[in-house]
Amino acid sequence: MSAPQLSPATVAVVSGRPARALDSELNTPVSLSATFVGGGSLGQAALGYGRFANPTWVALETALGDLEGGRALTFASGMAAVAAALHLLPAEGTVLVPHGAYNGTHSLTGLMSSQNRLTVRPVDITDVEAVRTALQAVSGPVLLWLESPTNPLLEVADIAALAAAGHEHDALVVVDNTFATPLLQRPLDLGADVVVHSVTKFLSGHSDVVLGAVVARDEVTLAALQAHRTFHGAIPGPLETFLALRGLRTLPLRLERSQASAAELARRLREHPAVTRVRHPSLPDDPGHALAAQQMSGFGALVSIEVTGGAAGADAVVDAVRLWVPATSLGGVESLVERRRRHGNEPTVVPQDLLRLSVGVEDVEDLWRDLQQALDTLV
Ligand SMILES: *Cc1c(COP(=O)(O)O)cnc(C)c1O
């Protein structure tokens, strides 16, 4: 059901359900069928084959499409979705990427560049004029890749201004909306052409699936993305899409709690002597605060901090936490902490001593006590 008049918190609950009929299922079941009946006088099946479509995918795609205000296609992972979106760029085109882009995006664009598939131009997406200048310098097809807030620097991009600048130069504008989710910002409404998600994160919310999605409005773009999925074959599993939709039902509740706790922790962390910098757009002096306050309906549930003692200091905090879980990933009900530069492919603009905190739904006082005692080991 498409329900644009309803609030997003309601859409998350009601969209993507089977039609109402006597004894119809409330939830779309996990459809485990590799093929669908069709041919001969029956005609062509709409679903056809398990690599083309699946009823359980469609349920999730309907809900996510309604939330983002477009049509969604799910993929086997966030990276499969990123790859599909990057392949919208014709061969030998140029992609403008945030200098602090998510490390998977950073690595994939680097790999495609080493294969002469595209040219990569890193840009500062917090500086609209700098992006405009970079766009002017490009000849040939161009794709403007945005992430806002970025992972893990939490930089905020002016999506509407950048989408307009991109379109002046015929760029395709893609936004990785993983950190904000459609509950906090809808990039298609701000002028972007394509939205990408790691559904693994907030949308699923329980750290039990790896899944991705792409959302767009333009039918030609959607057909190209769908052809990419069908023929490169990075399709989601039916069970994964079921779990993601189940998780999506509570996204509004989880996000409300997590981002309130994130803002509270950000305020307290600023006062801790072992913390040299706190990044969270809720903080009035955060570089992204004013823009986030205007562009987003909340500041999100990721906080990044820098600590004393360099990489070793940050690693000591990771070793000292008991409740927070040292692990990569984010957006689940469990709070996770990670020193991002432990990954060799993390962009070098990310400080060595930066810890990314993904704030879950535990009690905020418990989270604070554990973090505080871990940070106390540095002073
Ligand atoms: C995790 C993540 C991805 C990749 O998603 P996977 O589901 O891990 O493949 C892409 N973009 C951002 C911002 C992410 O955090």
Image (cartoon, rainbow, N blue to C red):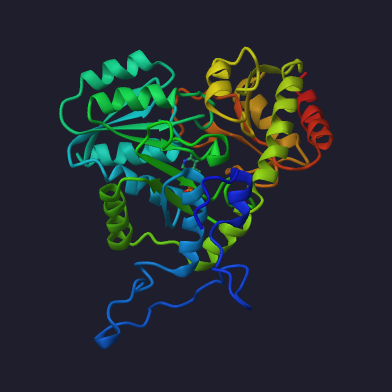
Q: Nearer the viewer, residue 123 or 178?
A: 178
Does residue 49 appear to the left or right of 273 in the view shown?
A: left
Q: Nearer the viewer, residue 236 or 170?
A: 170
Does residue 244 appear to the left or right of 256 in the view shown?
A: left
Residue at image location 39% in from the left, 51% down from the top: 80
Q: Quadrant of the C terminus?
A: top right
Residue at image location 54% in from the left, 71% down from the top: 30
Is 200 drawn above or below residue 265 in the view shown? below
Does residue 207 appear to the left or right of 49 in the view shown?
A: right
Q: Nearer the viewer, residue 377 or 67?
A: 67
Residue at image location 44% in from the left, 19% down from the top: 126
Residue at image location 48% in from the left, 37% down from the top: 186
Is 80 drawn above or below residue 193 in the view shown? below
Image x and y of residue 32, in percent: 49, 76
Residue 208 seen by the camera: no
Residue 224 seen by the camera: yes
Q: Quadrant of residue 53?
A: bottom left
**Which residue is farthest bottom?**
41
Q: Quadrant of residue 271?
A: top right
Image x and y of residue 160, in percent: 41, 25
Q: How many marks?
A: 0
Q: Quadrant of residue 152?
A: top right
Image x and y of residue 106, in percent: 39, 35
Image x and y of residue 229, in percent: 33, 58
Q: Nearer the viewer, residue 366 or 49?
A: 49
Is 103 drawn above or below residue 353 in the view shown? below
